[in-house]
Image (cartoon, coloured by chain):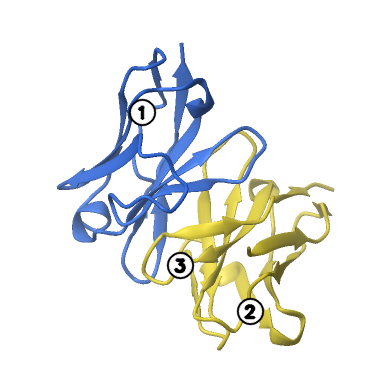
Amino acid sequence: QSALTQPASVSGSPGQSITISCSGTSSDIGGYNYVSWYQQHPGKAPKLMIHTVSNRPSGVSYRFSGSKSGNTASLTISGLQAEDEADYYCSSYASSSAYVFGTGTKVTVL
Amino acid sequence: QVQLQESGPGLVKPSGTLSLTCAVSGASITSIDWWSWVRQPPGKGLEWIGEIFHTGKTNSNPSLKSRVTLSVDKSQNQFSLMLTSVTAADTAVYYCARGGHYTPVWDSWGQGTLVTVSS
């Protein structure tokens, strides 16, 4: 299993919207609606932001939304805020009871 | 609110065995949940290691499967990871988390523990 492909970095100004892509194959993202997104601040554990492609856990801001088309999933952060500056990872079920993470994207708020 | 806490040696010699335990509080390890391990080498991305159910059923990353052993201690409400034949490439922050089983939804995480493989 290869890691899912994410852009190394994405940046935006406060208030703007940004989108992070997560590219996989038909054996992972394209084959299942089991995609999650995690936010990780430096030195901290990852935090679940989106699950099952587009569902937000309780307590996660409505500014975070997820989608999927074919073998690519996306995370959109609208109304970008300073506190959103962090690393973001996608993850997908990848058959045979295994999971794969994305390469990670560093979000910078300008 | 569920809390997870990793514990174990911070330094392991090459070719040795890495052993970590995750103590669970605020939830029973015999619930419907699965329990997972994820690691992150310094400055790098996340890697799923494996998951276990309280019945002892496990699933592991194919790339690590031959070296990974997962176990559950119901009496102590904790679960454990053993990784054999370690090399410097196994140096990482190791996290335990609640979730898994056909869906990459880990909703509670431990703070993580750094394990360094060095002589």
Spot occupied by residue B73 in the image (x, y as percentages of width and height): 71, 83
Near-viewer residue (B91 or A21) = A21
**Residue at mark 3: chain:** B
Spot occupied by residue B9 in the image (x, y as percentages of width and height): 83, 58
- Decide: is B75 above or below B88: below
Q: Nearer the viewer, mark 1 or mark 3?
A: 3
Q: Share a chain, discs 1 and 3?
A: no
Instruction: Say which quarter of the image contains residue B28.
Output: bottom right
- Left or right position of B117 against A89: right
- Decide: is A105 above or below A80: below
**Is label 1 in contact with label 2 (beta carbons under 8 Å)?**
no
Quickly name the residue at label 1.
A7
* Colour of chain B in the image: yellow
State the residue lying farthest toward the left: A70
Q: Say what secondary structure mark 3 lies in.
A: loop
Q: Say what secondary structure mark 1 lies in.
A: loop
- Decide: is B97 above or below A66: below
The residue lying at 56 percent from left, 37 percent from top is B44
Residue type (three-letter) at the residue carrying disc 3: Gly
Q: Which mark is residue B100?
A: 3
Spot occupied by residue B61 in the image (x, y as percentages of width and height): 48, 64
Q: Nearer the viewer, mark 2 or mark 3?
A: 2
Q: CA distance from mark 2 to mark 3?
A: 16 Å
Instruction: Say which quarter of the image contains residue A42.
Output: top right
Q: CA distance from mark 1 to mark 2?
A: 39 Å
- Rate crowding at label 1 as few (under 14), some (14 to 19) or many (20 or more) other CA atoms within 10 Å: some
The residue lying at 23 percent from left, 50 percent from top is A25
**Residue at mark 1: chain:** A
Instruction: Say which quarter of the image contains residue A9.
Output: top left
Quickly name the residue at label 2.
B28
Residue type (three-letter) at the residue carrying disc 1: Pro
